[in-house]
Image (tube, rainbow, N blue to C red):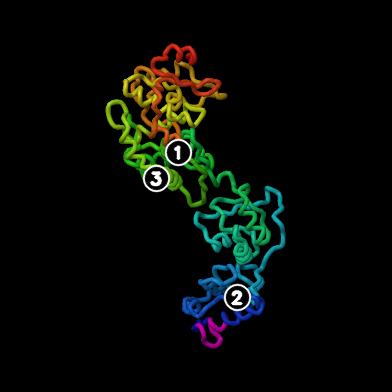
Amino acid sequence: MQDQEPGEPGGFGDEISRMLHARALRHPDHADPIGMTRRHLRAAKGRRRTALGATATLVVAGGAAFGSGYVGLSHDNGTGTGAASGANGSAPDYSAAATCAANVKVPVDVPRGATTTTIAHALFEAGVVKSEDAYINAANHDQGSADIGAGTYVVCPGISGTNAVLELLKKSNLSDASQIIVQPHEWGKDVIAGLIDKRKWKQADFDTAIQNNTIGLPAWSKDSLTGQFTIEGMLEPGTYALVASDTPQSVLTQMVANRMTFLKSIDFETKAAALTCGTAHCTPEQVLTVGSIAEGEVTDPDDGQKVAEGVYTRLKDNDYLGIDSTALYWIGHLPNGKLPSAAQVQDPNNPYSTYAPHHGLPPTPVYDTSDDMIKSALTPSHQGTYYWCVTATGTEFFMKNQTPAFKNACTAK
């Protein structure tokens, strides 16, 4: 097939003119019914039509005034390709609603940053829509389509383009394996376990990404005992979409990047260095660990600053912190929500125990920390808080000279 220059008789420009003239006739009241200038035609110069059997598809970038980011022109031979049909701009489309049995639904992967065309192709390949343009036309007439997020959706096949848009806007149609929620008060190692369960990835791949730090961790995010990088405290809480192209490295990189964005927004490293941990200036990792302790110890977010004050004061006095939640990180989950015993939290072989003989902070943060608890660790209260314990009515706090009251209220486990 010999391509011709736009504007030549019977050429590319001539075909566009015929199509746009037909569109103008259908929209006589539109301020700019054609929506295609000579500049757009020149921009399209040299584009080639790709022949697929008897079907040729032509896409011109530039945008019409009808809400479409481009004008799709094609000839359709009735075989159900993704092309629009005929000069009137119609596209092969199903009329069915999105009602089908769960076992009939098909997966459709929407990549991160996907364009309307990319989504249309995925839907067409999955047999959801009759043509790509059926979806494109519907999406261009539904402003809500811009809110379609990445992930794997499970939808009915053989539905109209309009219904396809609506189905992708329903978060309930996202497959469980297409997103993960990182929550405060969660261990980073549990986030990884969740990802392994959802995506069938390997623990070794996560370990390699962390140990080699191919995920953007700051130099200070290290285990104080082993010197190895750690993700504990470095995964920003939130909902993360998982797409087919994701890997353990890419997902952790996104979570760490989001945390770093937050830390930079509050000037975390500078403010951390202004605090004292024991006899020296705190490191960012130490302050993040204090925030994680507050995360595990309070029932009211407003109490985080009191916990932070208690921790910094006891570090200054070289007193044992005696915090059960740090030891639990090493012990692991206990059945039926059972709490650890005194013997377990005071186990001298537990490196996360903060009872004798373990002075100072645990080797790493012990919980994924909320933004609020990180702020609390940077701004400890000045109320003389030294002791605290979690009771049935909440977290109770005591000053250093209130040791008897503390012991009476906080019975040993």
Vertical arrangement, residue 387 with respect to residue 90, above or below? above
Vertical arrangement, residue 404 with respect to residue 130, above or below? above
Separation (CA) of disc 3 from disc 1: 11 Å
- Region of the chain picked out in magenta, as a range: 6-15
In the image, taking residue 129 as reference, residue 277 lies left or right, namely: left
Separation (CA) of disc 1 from disc 2: 50 Å
Q: Amino acid at mark 3?
A: Ser
Q: Residues within 10 Å of mark 2 (few under 14, many from 20)?
A: few
Vertical arrangement, residue 32 with respect to residue 387, above or below? below
Residue 138 screen position, x and y as percent:
63, 63
Which element carries disc 2, helix, strand or loop? loop
Residue position for label 1: 371
Residue 260 drawn in magenta:
no
Query: As rendered, which of 394 and 255 lies closer to the eye?
Result: 394
Q: Amino acid at mark 1?
A: Asp
Query: Disc number at residue 265?
Result: 3
Q: Nearer the viewer, mark 1 or mark 2?
A: 2
- Asked if one can make out residue 352 in the rendered structure from this viewpoint, the answer is no
Residue drawn at point x = 42 percent, y = 33 percent:
376
Residue 8 drawn in magenta:
yes
Determine which quarter of the picture holds residue 293: top left
- Reading the chain from its start, which is encountered first: label 1 or label 2? 2
Q: Residue furthest left?
A: 280
Separation (CA) of disc 2 from disc 3: 46 Å
Query: As rendered, which of 92 and 234 lies closer to the eye?
Result: 234
- Reading the chain from its start, which is encountered first: label 2 or label 3? 2
Residue position for label 2: 31
Which element carries disc 1, helix, strand or loop? helix
